[in-house]
Image (tube, rainbow, N blue to C red):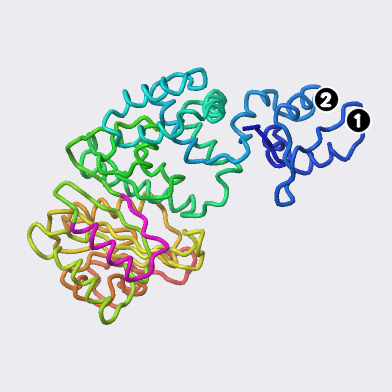
Amino acid sequence: MEPLVTMSDIARIASVTRQAVTNWRSRSASTPFPSPKSVVADVEHFDRDEVIDWLEATGRGLNASARLDAPAVAVPAGLAVEDAVVLLALRASVGQDLAPLAPDERIALAREVDPDDTFLLDEVIRLSTADDLAAYVDGLHEASYGPSDALDRLYMTRAAQGGRGLTAAAVSLLQQLADACRTFLGPDGVAVELRLDPQARSVATGFESASPNSERAELRLHAIDGRQVESIAGPLVKVIALTGLDDRATLDAADEIAVGLDAGQIAVIVGPASALCDRLRGDLYDARKDTLRTGAEDHGCALVASFKLPRGLWRDAHRQSLGLWVLRGATSAAAAVVGDLSGSLVDGPELAADLLGALEQTGARSYRYGRAVRYAAVWTGDTVVPLGIGAQPATAREAASAFERLFRSRAGHSRAHPWLRPP
């Protein structure tokens, strides 16, 4: 596979703008700019090594390490990203280059790493003769700061473009909520299970081990990030995205997740707010009610928190609001913390603090965004998150008159309203 680069790739390698590369091509010079090797969908592709030689010969660009960085930017023609992830997981697990090895040697290493074929062996057998791919993965790893950084760089390449999924803000928010759940359960010895877009794997930051029930592709990502992938007994946090499903499919999936939660397990589910938070009628109402009913019973699965999130957190549908459920297995709840954040600017640590309070179920704390609602009202209501519901406003204590109650409730605005003074 020949490593090719586009004009945008060249700009990244040289640390300049795309327009600068265009200017280099248009200007006559003693050393002409390399000619494109192919044109695909009106996009020109250039030989990576020829471009690097040209940059060094002309002194163009702002990146003195362009030759070292180029393998992390350029991708071979026809590269399948998931195949590269497979060999990168093997490279990360064995700690040695793969290109110098024979096919049977790569298979032997994979069998040593994954004797039960839980996440890697079958795929390595299929790719054992892919010498060019192995060479690309070695070069990508050499140009990066370790396997995890290599994977980040792979997802930034042209071959990985087109993925949409959750925005960076949504991923950051889920990471902080997952960390709050880990803190509540441990924080040490807590495993994680993700059902998210691979580029959202940073949600697992802070976890040292992965659930043995995770899917193969997810376990490969954990191996690259250095987490244990063997069976580990103990508490578990699941973070699951149900985006892209209709209301019926969302509720069916949420019910399946709730039924499978055991003691010491928490599930953070993000999906359409229309199914998880908003008003439902008929069969859909009954389905959601049946899922949440067990939270009122001993050893059921309780909804401890639900939030309707702001729009714009899902790239595929910016105008669709996402909803959030946090379920705790094998427990009952006296109350659930709910909040309508659809019109708010959400501070992640503050929302994570609200979630931690909801998990504790003490009833002796205030919330920044949510409000504790009796569980009976949550699972029987046609709306899980009522429109506009938020934190309980502070009440003025020992207010003897209507004026004093007004004054104390407006105390935070006294500078803006100098006429508001106590008698």
Q: CA distance from mark 2 to mark 1?
A: 9 Å
Give whichever of 189, 247 is nearer the camera: 247
Q: Amino acid at mark 1?
A: Ala
Secondary structure state at the residue bearing disc 1: loop
- Relative to 122, residue 363 above or below: below
Residue 52, x across and y down, in percent: 73, 26
Residue type for callout 2: Thr
Left or right of 100 on screen, residue 302: left
**Rendered location of residue 320, percent (x, y):** 46, 68
Q: What residue is disc 2 on?
A: 58
Residue 148 in magenta? no
Tell me if label 2 and label 1 are in contact, CB under 8 Å: yes
Using the image, determine if residue 237 lies above or below residue 16: below
Q: Main secondary structure of the magenta part?
A: helix
Question: For residue 374, what is the image quadrant?
Answer: bottom left
Which class describes the residues within 10 Å of circle 1: few (<14), some (14-19), or many (20+)?
few
Q: Nearer the viewer, residue 403 or 212?
A: 212
Q: Is residue 423 visible?
A: no
| Image-quadrant location for residue 285 | bottom left
Return the residue at label 1.
29
Classify the position of the C terminus by image quarter.
bottom left
When asked about the image quadrant of residue 244, the answer is bottom left
Instruction: Give the vertical position of 35 relative to 113 (above or below).
Output: below
Give the SS element for disc 2. Answer: helix
Q: Residue at x 92, y 34 (%)?
A: 28
Residue 189 vertical position relative to residue 319 in the rendered view, above or below:
above
Residue 207: x percent and y percent? 31, 37
Magenta region: 239-259
Residue 201, position as x, y percentages in the image: 41, 43
The answer to whether one can see residue 203 in this image is: yes
Q: Residues within 10 Å of mark 2 (few under 14, many from 20)?
A: few
